[in-house]
Amino acid sequence: MTDASRTLVPHWIDGREAPSATGAAPTRTGEVYDPATGRVVRHVAFATAADVDAAVAAATRAFPAWRDASLAERARTLFRFRELMAARADVLADAITAEHGKTRSDAQGEVARGLEVVEFACGIPHLLKGGYSARATSQVDVHSLRQPLGVVGIISPFNFPVMVPCWFFPIAVATGNTVVCKPSEKDPSPLLLVARLWAEAGLPDGVFNVVHGDAEAVDRLLEHPDVRAVSFVGSTPVARHVHATASAAGKRVQALGGAKNHMVVLPDADIDLAADAAVNAGFGSAGERCMAISVVVAVGSVADRLVPAIAERIGDLRVGDGRTDPDMGPLVTGAHRDRVVGYLDAGVTAGATLVVDGRRHAVDGDASGFWLGPTLFDHVQPDTALYRDEIFGPVLSVVRVGTYDEALALVNAGAYGNGTAIFTNDGRAASRFEREVEVGMVGINVPIPVPMAYYSFGGWKESLFGDLHAHGTDGVQFFTRGKVVTTRWLDPRDGGVDLGFPRTD
């Protein structure tokens, strides 16, 4: 074991790094890999229930003072954090590439999109403005306000170790809550860097905490009586468990699940632009995106031109170590790579045509890395696992249909409703698709329709459990609860006993 492999990623509890709640060595740890070399580069502390309890206790102690901090103070802290995060964007991107494997430019883009939510949260004084009605009735004024919940938990996935947590914690902190984050154990270091930036920005100790680990840490957060709300992003089976468990414990929950995103290409679409979009959206970050396009629905004869165009572009893609900024990097772990590879043989067995086999793609990197090149299937049938399952890797499937109506029916029949796109130059067809498709986020000639921070991110059906989406106005509502105050300053002449129901005359 090398010295590097013994480096421990600690928790962040009450404003400082801690290997455990007691300060002693953790009882359990996990391995963190460099996906481009396949080697263990560090270990990460796995939280026990006691570690989670310590983080929640720190957040509980910090809540009253942070709740009572002025909006101006909270906004200034957010602005300082924003400046520090922007200044250290390259450091954060390097940490993402080192543990996730995505290319450096992709990691930089992730940090930039996370910063957008921080910038949105900097406007918290405006976002928390309530309503006011003077003389709503005779001598009565009414006003509304929103107040923080308390301690909130955030459980985030490996594919965006900075951006996805940023969907939640800037708004949670800005609205006066305190936070306990549980990032993925596969790439834990970036969020620890974020915690240090918060401390440098002057955020009080205990407002932002990070615990690492596996199901033990997750379940304790879901069940802890002092955690008021939970935000989660991950696979649909786990999202369903998170929603059911936390809801049963009386918590507010938003659990964003899996996806199987379709890109519909109509016969009038520009083939070159559509092929570019399919490759970019299908293989960026090695397909490890919840908004990745994994199915191209080719209408009519367009597939005869589109499939060769996609295959040609795949041949030009450079796969290698993300630090050298190729087109595509490795998958996050060997186990995940092997799971994705299993779909290639299964797809051929099911009768799909393997047009490009990613196992044969040239790799510019260490032979021990977790490599799989971009893969393209044609003639994929909707009743196969290749079509149904969220593969979460660089595997793009083409399904051929005869008409727009067939394409729409295919998309709407899917279990997921996260993102979708249509490529066409027909405005009427695009408008119809926008209205009729049963998906939460829709792109018109935009393959990855991730909303801007001041809109909200979230899908339909099996892609979302809970009523409110991430960030934007939904995020502000999720991390606050409303209160309405009715005021009347009494005059002695207003006295007297009247048991009738109050009227609004």
Image (spheres, rainbow, N blue to C red):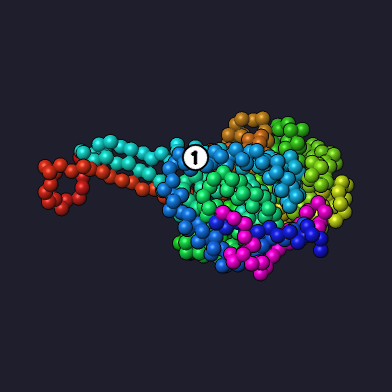
Residue 302 appears at what percent x and percent y?
A: 75, 37
Q: Horizontal placement of 273 versus 243: left or right?
A: right
Number of residues whose C-alpha sits closer than 10 Å to that of mark 1, classed few (under 14), some (14–19) or many (20 or more): some
Asked which secondary structure carries label 1, the reply is helix
Residue plotted at (21% across, 38% down): 139
Badge count:
1
Position of residue 327 in the picture relative to residue 181 (left or right): right
Span shown in magenta:
15-40
- What percent of the width, then of the height, locates residue 365? 86, 49
| Rendered residue at 50%/61% (across/down) | 57
One can see residue 119 in this view: yes
x and y percentages locating residue 58 in the rendered image: 51, 59
In the rendered image, which quarter is residue 135 located in?
A: top left
Residue at image point 74% right, 47% down: 97
> Identity of the amino acid at label 1?
Ala
**Residue 129 lies in what quarter of the image?**
top left
- Toward the viewer: 336 or 2? 2
Quadrant holding the N terminus: bottom right
**Residue, disc 1:** 75
Residue 163: x and y in percent read 63, 46
Q: Is residue 91 above or below residue 335?
A: above
- The quadrant of the image that shows the C terminus is top left
Residue at the extreme bottom of the image, as rendered: 27
Front in this rendered view, residue 403 or 305: 305
Q: Is residue 39 magenta?
A: yes
Residue 314 seen in the figure: no
Q: Which residue occupies the foreground of this view, 436 or 172? A: 172
**Rendered view: 201 above or below 237:** above
Give the residue at x 75% y 42%.
104
Magenta region includes residue 364: no
- Does residue 2 lie above or below 450 as drawn? below
